Amino acid sequence: MTELEAIQRCQQGDITGLHVLFDLHRTKVYNLSWRMLGTPQDAEDALQEIFIKVFDRIKNYRGDSAFSTWVYRMTTNHCLDLLRRRKIVTFLGFENAPEAEDKKDSEKAVDLGMSPVIAKALEKLPEKQKACLLLREMDELSYEDIAAALQLSLGSVKSNIHRAKAFLKETLGKEGLTQEDV
Amino acid sequence: MKTIWNDEDITRVLKESAQTRPDEAVFERAWFKIEDRLTASKRHFWSHIVWKPWSHPVRWVAMAACLCLVLTGTISHFNTIGEMENVEMGSYLMNISNPIDAISNDQNVVKVSTLLSEPSSAAPDMSDEVKIDSLASDEIFL
């Protein structure tokens, strides 16, 4: 079954269509959620929520943009929304900060397959900058697709990526780390 | 040993990190849960129709406003009915207790006594005819 057929089946309320779409996009959705939210548990929960949202809202998908871009938009919106809620909950003092979870940053980074220093530096980035950078460098999306996914202007996407890279360069330089260390 | 980082280094490091593939069991578990939830939501057909105000604080406010509106409407409706019944009951009791007074107080009823005492505009005034006749009789006599 092709992606288009799967989308049409989904629009008719057929779950088998969603299964095909899930198999096609699950890895990228999961990885992006993981990098944005920081833990595999959150990424797994996000994966479920996002694909349930995809099934609920697929009738609104008109095919103006690529389906992957539409799914990425849903993923980033979901993650940004979760991070915003977490900030409010932490600010109000209902819950401990997400950093104080069971796993340490270094363990999380190993799970993510990246250096703890890089993971820590990514954590410090503002959400929008982080999302732009991850979509560009890890998921290899074009600037146009990132702009569509995050509902930002092309200029804003480019400046966000530039700032994020500048921040990472400065942070890694300050730490005195070499490319070999990472 | 290089300590100055450039854009290409950052890109390379991030791309290398992107190569990791998560465990297949994670996806199987996630799909099982998705399928379960979607099937469950199909079973509970009424859950799509029934409005759930508890899912968002704004809906609580909307729900409270609706309840207030319904309550106020109901109270004012019953008050209006009560007032009308009181007026009807009052006039009925007055009719029973003092029918003559009720007639005099009732503006729609014309009093018979007034009709008899007032001069009617419809009836011809006979006083002028009497005067003419008296003059004519004077001429005859002259």
Image (tube, coloured by chain):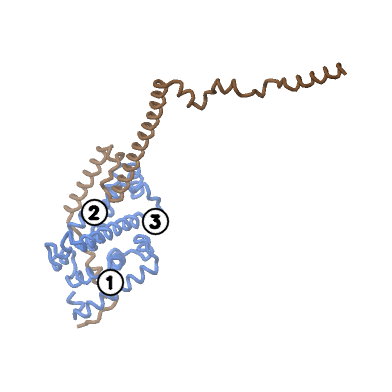
Chain colours: A blue, B brown
Q: Are marks 1 and 3 in contact (CB under 8 Å)?
A: no
Q: Amino acid at mark 2?
A: Leu
Q: Residue A99 at x, y = what percent?
A: 16, 65
Left or right, B104 with respect to A73, comes to: right
**Subunit bearing disc 2:** A
Spatial CA distance of label 1 from label 3 is 26 Å
Snapshot quadrant of residue B80? top left
Mark 3 surroundings within 10 Å by alpha-carbon count, few (fewer than 14), some (14 through 19), many (20 or more): few
Q: Residue at x 36, y 31 (%)?
A: B82
* Side of B138 where B121 appears, left or right: left
As helix, strand or loop, the secondary structure at mark 3 comes to loop
Amino acid type indicated by mark 1: Thr
Q: Position of residue A88 (x, y in %)?
A: 24, 61
Task: Tell me, yes or no, whether dots 1 and 2 are on the same chain.
Answer: no
Q: Which residue carries the number 2 mark? A: A47
* Residue under label 3: A65
Q: Is residue A134 above or below residue A62?
A: below
Which residue position holds label 1?
B11
| Vertical placement of residue B6 versus B28, above or below | below
Q: Residues within 10 Å of mark 1 (few under 14, many from 20)?
A: some
